[in-house]
Amino acid sequence: MAAAWGRRGGSVLLRGALRAAPARACSSGVPVRAPSAAAQELQNSGRGRFLLEHASPFSAFLTDSFGRQHNYLRISLTEKCNLRCQYCMPEEGVQLTPKSELLTAQEIITLARLFVKEGVDKIRLTGGEPLIRPDVVDIVGQLYKLEGLKTIAVTTNGINLTRLLPRLKEAGLNAINISLDTLVPAKFEFIVRRKGFHKVMEGIHKATELGYRPVKVNCVVMRGFNEDELLSFVDFTKDLPLDVRFIEYMPFDGNKWNFKKMVSYKEMLDTIKQQWPELEKLPCEASSTAKSYKVPHFQGQISFITSMSEHFCGSCNRLRITADGNLKVCLFGNSEVSLRDHLRSGASEEELVQIIGAAVSRKKKQHAGMFNISQMKNRPMILIGGFPGHKMYSHVTFLFSSEPALMSFPLCQDALQNPPNSKQLGHTFSHWLTLRTSCCVFQKNPNSTFDTKCLEASPIGQVSVDCQSKEASPESEFCTRDLGSHTKVPCASDNLTHTDEEGRATMVDVGGKPDSRRIAVAVAVVRLGEKAFGMVRQNQMKKGDVLAVAQIAGIQGAKLTSQLIPLCHNIPLNHVEVSLSLDEARFAVVIRSSCQTWGRTGVEMEALTAASLAALTVYDMCKAVTHDIVIEEVKLLSKTGGQRGDFSRG
């Protein structure tokens, strides 16, 4: 078992047995496992009793004033990353440390050896992105040689994992955490500003193929971004030996943390239990940061890292070394000690141990001693090395819908109150999305959970319906159905539905209506004039890609309809599609939107809002060239479902 006594002498087996022995409850109240067989064997033997009675205690240098024993060290190998996640760095970016001031491989091993001698038995390599460091395999191999080191782990974004994992496993890597915050490929590429979703998925599968059990997947949950994907992530564990770890959003310097963005552990758990009421709670280690659950008969499990709602400071056993060699005893604190400087100035091993011990002894009881950690001053997450993933979210220009059930594509949550910088928005989308007469609809490959294809947008007269429709293909998440030959204009109502008997505005009570499939299609036309039209066609607008930004604005508009139109119901949309095409004859942008739901009220207003918001966005991005822009023909083309029947403009 785990760590050796190091200079104090003794038995590797003994210390590991001692650590497994205490049987106490973890932070979630579930008992930890009973004393290990090794510990019981030692207690039952004469020699074992002697060793237990004379055992050297855990290193005093790694034990703080509250009795917490720190046997887990996280080492950041680099500040660099091969992704450009908007949620990982502050808006103004970060200043990278000069290479000469970063720890060398030999310095990393020297410090690691010192910590292992004092009782550390688990080391996790983080970043930045640790797998872009050229000597990462060699570092793992040298760490593997350290006597007493039980676990060598890595936290990675997964981009390089498939290529490097066989060599890393051979070198001694025995635990993997992969950061993945969405299962939607387009959302992934939008957020990280790079392609790579399929590489991450390949990395996850490669890890399971090579026998890693479990493969931990870190998912930071943030309201308006990915809380709508909770059930999808749980389903991800059905056929794979994964531990999907839902992490509460935490504040760090530059991310302008807001409590409203945090989704608590209990809220996540309630959402999941609605789908899987049979969810089982699993036992946990005394020092575990995770509350673990499992859906019966699923291969994998899920966990919750409750760093905000139910902190686990009382059992914290972690220390961190940054890429530039600073020791951080608390993730949330800004107090750091430069081990690099002492190492390079020739400090002896004993002096380094004293310096480390002094820093550990100053560790506060919880959250670096701060009452309100949202006001703390600290490094940006990219420069710390993460917890438990290596990235956190910043309040970037692009946020997401605040409605949990409506999330389908990204844009700005508060775009109406705080409009995003259109130039920045356009540049971001131009990396991955070029819209002319088509848009993306994700089609599931029956042979792969992760394969997606980009389909042509349906022509006017067709709309997308979800895969539960009787007409839907079993291979496709969305299919098309021609509405033109099946629609007719219903009889008009003699009364307004949104006023009461006294003429006051009122919301329609739809509680008694039956659920049905509701689909609506709307259009709008923006006449730009020849000059502006040519610049849009050539993608020469200074603010960015007009068509790309307008398409996403329309999608977001559909999801925010109930917040914009006072008497509209908040509808859980199943699908929103917005496409833009260029009409050279009229020097115009033609916008077509379609919305669908399964519910008690229609989605006409959502489709009209989508078309209108897309049109207004085109206007906004082109007004610097000309104000002679006309928005016209905003109208409903068709709608299906509901008691009043179908409608088609013919």
Image: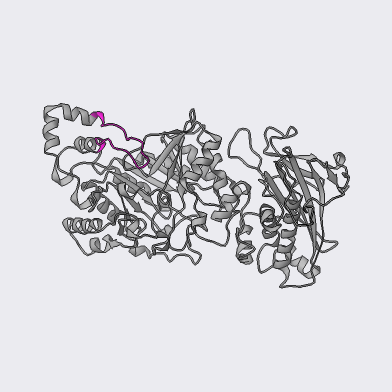
Residue 434 shows in this picture: no
State yes or no: residue 32 in magenta: yes
Query: x and y percent of residue 120 in the render?
Result: 26, 46
- Tell me where residue 443 sits by quadrant: top right
Front-most of residues 614 and 74:
614
Q: Is residue 424 above or below residue 13?
A: below
Q: Residue at x 21, y 37 (%)?
A: 18
Front-most of residues 108 and 392:
392
Query: x and y percent of residue 214 in the render?
Result: 42, 36
- Tell me where residue 57 sits by quadrant: top left
| Extreme residue in the front direction | 502
Query: x and y percent of residue 298 in the render?
Result: 49, 30
Front-most of residues 44 and 12:
44
- 539 sits to left or right of 222: right
Main SS of the magenta part reads loop
Q: How many marks?
A: 0
Task: Read off the magenta span.
Answer: 19-37
Q: Residue at x 21, y 47 (%)?
A: 117
